[in-house]
């Protein structure tokens, strides 16, 4: 098979290895060799390295390019792959007869030499880039700005060298000669003392190799079903959506490599990075991926040693330990020279990374009251952990901590360098995740179609753990005996059925209608263990605890509990539930199925935290609790809230037949009444806290995350009359749910309940994770929204298309704000249609998106027909002069517009003159915002002349334009309504 055929046949595999888990390095290394061998010319290189495109898109471009160049180019490409990639990455790939990378004739010019020697130059300059930049700066070849652009902290050392070489080539022959002459100088015979200090000893290098091997072996697989199934992390890992928020509240999307990078840093003096996400969002898998890529030297290249910890497993450590013992006993034991290795760690904290997965599962909440800074003194694990996180101990070591959002309080947030938000899968991520689980494309397509065909299920699959459950239970899903799952409870009942089906004596024949009753004994035993664990913040169980609950090996073998091999010693085996949400689900089953339960057990789940703890201590399992539970952080509350949510779902009328033989109807009816009563009380507590409106302002309610939880409980019940009763007493004009971690799952529940509002409200969902899927879930409640605020929610044109198709039909819908989303010119055609159709629409705010003059022209078409719009905000787009001209022309005859913002849109004097014409004729406008543009004095002169003929305009904002201080002073004296 020739090289072209090999590339065609192995295209998917080549794409996977070059992606390298999100790192650019494999692709960059191959490109260096292809440039050196003249397989690619410089223009080819620029086509492949497009920064705005995803890594996979650039790799596909390279594969197409090489294939089109013919057999020789394909041979060189395969040879480059074989030369650059590690052995484990090349496994399974075929490289044909091979092609030796040969030396070419020496180039005639210095710039050509940079390309011919590029691989060698990258290796040589990687540790000496400062010297090269210094010589280029002192000779005048580079400016300070050039140096800064090369040494951006976001680049790895290798990437910095490549940017340097690219810049030198662009500067021309003189710069290239200067760099090559510098490199021809003999290297210093003795390294500086700082380099000596940073050089690890042979024993440290041996320890690093052992630690990499240990971390790799722990990270290579994901275990499920009690160890009976294992998946390669490489095969199934799918990137989640990562965001970081700056001090202004704006978010930026991150890649995996940016988690410990400088992007999004808020506190330069802190060392702890928090990765937060809801239960099941993929936090542990993300950290595992980081570990694996470090072990393979594919990521975190500046980290010499990485020490991974599980907070769940640290709970099981009752001894007092020193930092040295913590590192070597819990991670990797040095075979020799322990003291030397530990001293290297102490001396080089900037080369070390600690990860702590699941801080929300640590028994004690964070406190900074007890200070500890001695690395050799033995102290309790909580003291050791908390002092590491706040930097009192081992200042300078980078720490990555994962947790659920509300389990991290203000006391810990003071010590955070930044917080990275993990927001689950995008719709494309769901498809990718499903396809990775099936070798049969037809089956993958069937599952994807089933998911996409049901918006509620699609919303659930946004959370990775729910998506995983749906994939594992595809047979039950496609059979559809009980309908497509609508709620989280439906999904977990599906997994319950699936596990019992797997272990039944006749798995092919399926389970009978009474399958839950047949396995009731196992469910109750596991449920009691689960609830007891939640009440004591216990997530790892000993063999004795299983025995005490009469849990047999057969029960364990079903797969709900898995064996913890890494913290089980000798005869003391340890077990944990497959996922924390599964533990909550079994606890909920126990609450509604155990006939010996205290009648108040359900109502306690819905009590506020300060009353809940004291109540639980009096329960039938209260004697198992420790007083330290009262000091525990918000994770316990979060787990009990998940349990309450499951209790609500299990008591839904939709599941009455399933529980018919497990629970007497009278008991079940009593339980339902308790849940409804508890939800009603908590809702009333929220409503009573609504302050009276200030005179002249609308009555509004700023809901807390617990309000969203109550809404989700109501949705799980799937009883419309309960939703109606809940909303009957909500008397507000504005409902604010900002920063509440609202994703598609929450949107589904909100829409189900809010559609029962008695009068329309303004719904504010700024700074959440709604996305396109969440927008679709919100559509049922859109008729009851007069305003919709969705700033900073990762919404694209497709989400807007669906939203506005519905919005046109909604008489009450009058305002929308979509600042800082992912909108392009495409969305403006939908808004244009809305403006033409709705002559009562009042406000359209599309700031900080990607709308150009093309979008402005489409929008202008709708504006020219509309006679109701009062507010139009396009701040932070790219409409330019042309966009300003068409908008001004379209708005000239508007009798309603009072506020227009074109801040930071690249508008120059031509655009200002067009707006001046608009001002001259329009009599309704009151404020015009033109800050941060490129308007010169002549443009402002036009505005001044127009203002002389218009008395309705109160302010024109012109800060940050192309005007000198003297011009601003002169112009402001001419017209007092101008603000500079």
Image (tube, rainbow, N blue to C red):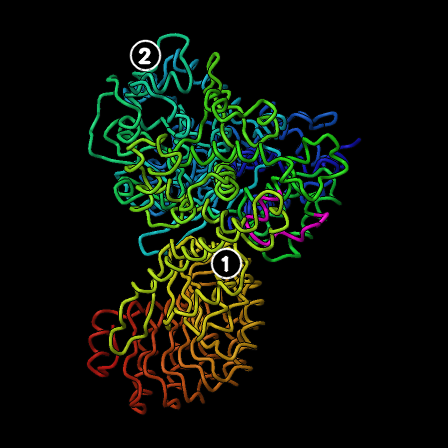
Few, some or many residues within 10 Å of mark 1 (<14, 14–19, 20+): many
Disc 1 on helix, strand or loop? helix
Q: Is residue 140 visible?
A: no
Tell me the quadrant of the picture where the C terminus can be found. bottom left
| Numbered circle sitting on residue 150 | none
Which residue is nearer to you in this view: 484 or 235?
A: 484
Q: Is residue 493 magenta?
A: yes
Give the extent of the magenta segment: 478-494
Q: Residue furthest top?
A: 336
Q: Mark 1 points at which residue?
A: 749
Q: Name the residue under label 2.
A: 340
Q: Quarter-wise, where is residue 62 in the image?
A: top right
Q: Quarter-wise, where is residue 825 in the image?
A: bottom right
From the image, state whether disc 1 or disc 2 is nearer to you.
1
> Residue 7 at what x, y percent from top left?
72, 36
Q: Residue at x 32, y 72 (%)?
A: 699
């Amino acid at each position: 098979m020739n090289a072209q055929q090999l590339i065609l046949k192995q295209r998917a595999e080549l794409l996977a290895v070059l992606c390298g888990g999100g790192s650019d390095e494999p692709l960059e290394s191959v490109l260096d060799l292809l440039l050196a061998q003249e397989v690619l010319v410089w223009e080819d290189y620029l086509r492949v390295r497009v920064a705005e495109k995803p890594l996979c898109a650039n790799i596909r471009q390279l594969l197409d390019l090489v294939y089109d160049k013919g057999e020789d180019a394909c041979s060189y490409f395969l040879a480059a792959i074989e030369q650059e990639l590690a052995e484990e990455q090349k496994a399974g790939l075929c490289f044909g007869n091979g092609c030796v990378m040969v030396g070419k004739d020496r180039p005639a010019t210095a710039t050509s030499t940079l390309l011919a020697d590029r691989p060698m130059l990258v290796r040589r300059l990687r540790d000496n880039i400062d010297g090269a930049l210094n010589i280029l700066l002192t000779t005048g070849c580079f400016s300070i700005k050039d140096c800064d652009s090369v040494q951006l902290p976001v680049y790895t050392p290798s990437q910095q060298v490549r940017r340097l070489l690219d810049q030198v080539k662009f500067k021309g022959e003189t710069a290239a000669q200067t760099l090559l002459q510098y490199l021809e100088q003999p290297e210093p015979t003795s390294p500086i003392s700082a380099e000596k200090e940073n050089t690890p000893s042979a024993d440290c290098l041996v320890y690093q190799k052992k630690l990499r091997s240990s971390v790799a072996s722990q990270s290579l697989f994901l275990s499920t079903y009690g160890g009976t199934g294992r998946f390669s992390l490489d095969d199934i890992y799918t990137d989640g959506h990562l965001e970081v928020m700056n001090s202004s509240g704006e978010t930026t999307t991150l890649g995996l490599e940016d988690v410990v990078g400088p992007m999004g840093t808020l506190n330069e003096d802190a060392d702890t990075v928090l990765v937060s996400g809801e239960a099941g969002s993929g936090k542990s898998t993300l950290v595992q991926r980081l570990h694996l890529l470090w072990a393979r030297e594919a990521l975190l290249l500046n980290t010499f040693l990485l020490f991974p910890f599980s907070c769940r497993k640290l709970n099981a450590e009752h001894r007092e330990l020193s930092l040295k013992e913590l590192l070597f006993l819990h991670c990797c034991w040095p075979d020799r020279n322990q003291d030397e290795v530990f001293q290297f760690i102490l001396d080089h904290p900037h080369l070390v990374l600690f990860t702590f997965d699941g801080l929300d599962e640590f028994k004690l909440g964070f406190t900074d009251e007890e200070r500890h800074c001695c690395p050799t003194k033995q102290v309790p694990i909580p003291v050791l952990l908390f002092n590491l996180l706040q930097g009192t101990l081992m200042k300078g070591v980078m720490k990555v901590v994962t947790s659920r959002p509300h389990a991290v309080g203000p006391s810990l947030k003071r010590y955070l360098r930044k917080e990275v938000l993990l927001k689950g899968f995008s719709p494309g991520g769901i498809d990718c995740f499903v396809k990775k689980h099936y070798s049969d494309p037809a089956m993958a397509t069937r599952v994807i179609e089933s998911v996409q065909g049901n918006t509620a299920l699609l919303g659930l699959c946004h959370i990775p753990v729910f998506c995983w459950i749906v994939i594992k239970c595809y047979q039950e899903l496609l059979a559809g005996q009980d309908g497509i799952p609508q709620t989280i409870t439906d999904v977990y009942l599906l997994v319950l059925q699936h596990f019992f089906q797997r272990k039944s004596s006749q798995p092919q024949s399926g389970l009978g209608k009474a399958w839950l009753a047949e396995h009731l004994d196992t469910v109750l035993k596991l449920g009691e263990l689960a609830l007891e664990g939640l009440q004591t913040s216990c997530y790892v169980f000993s063999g004795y605890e299983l025995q005490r609950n009469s849990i047999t090996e057969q029960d364990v073998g079903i797969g709900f509990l898995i064996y913890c091999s890494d913290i089980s010693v000798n005869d003391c085996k340890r077990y944990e539930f497959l996922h924390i949400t599964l533990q909550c689900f079994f606890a909920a089953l126990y609450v509604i199925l155990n006939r010996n339960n205290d009648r108040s057990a359900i109502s306690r789940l819905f009590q506020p935290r300060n009353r809940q703890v004291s109540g639980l201590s009096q329960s039938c399992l209260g004697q198992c609790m420790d007083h330290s539970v009262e000091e525990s952080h918000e994770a316990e509350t979060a787990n009990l809230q998940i349990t309450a949510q499951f209790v609500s779902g299990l008591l839904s009328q939709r599941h009455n037949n399933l529980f018919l033989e497990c629970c007497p109807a009278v008991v079940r009816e009593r339980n339902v009444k308790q849940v409804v009563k508890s939800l009603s009380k908590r809702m009333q507590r929220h409503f009573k806290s609504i302050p009276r409106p200030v005179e002249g302002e609308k009555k509004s309610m700023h809901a807390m995350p617990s309000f969203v939880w109550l809404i989700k409980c109501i949705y799980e019940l799937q009883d419309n009359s309960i939703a109606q009763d809940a909303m009957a007493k909500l008397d507000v004009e504005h409902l604010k749910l900002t920063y509440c971690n609202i994703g598609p799952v929450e949107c589904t529940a909100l829409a189900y309940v809010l559609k029962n509002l008695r009068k329309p409200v303004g719904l504010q969902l700024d700074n959440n994770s709604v996305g396109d899927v969440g927008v679709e879930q919100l559509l049922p409640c859109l008729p009851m929204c007069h305003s919709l605020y969705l700033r900073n929610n990762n919404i694209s044109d497709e989400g807007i298309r669906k939203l506005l198709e519905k919005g046109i039909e909604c008489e009450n819908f009058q305002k929308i704000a979509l600042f800082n989303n992912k909108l392009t010119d495409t969305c403006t055609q939908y808004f244009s249609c809305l403006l033409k159709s709705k002559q009562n629409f009042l406000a359209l705010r599309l700031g900080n998106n990607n709308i150009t003059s093309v979008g402005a022209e489409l929008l202008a078409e709708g504006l020219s027909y509309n006679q109701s719009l009062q507010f139009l905000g396009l701040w932070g787009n790219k409409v330019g002069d042309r966009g300003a001209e068409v908008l001004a022309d379209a708005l000239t005859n508007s009798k309603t517009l009072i506020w227009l913002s074109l801040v930071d849109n690249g508008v120059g004097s031509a655009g200002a003159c067009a707006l001046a014409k608009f001002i001259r004729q329009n009599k309704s406008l009151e404020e015009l915002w033109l800050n941060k543009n490129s308007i010169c004095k002549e443009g402002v002169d036009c505005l001044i002349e127009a203002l002389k003929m218009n008395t309705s305009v109160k302010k024109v904002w012109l800060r940050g334009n192309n005007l000198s201080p003297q011009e601003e002073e002169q112009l402001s004296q001419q017209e007092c309504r101008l603000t500079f």
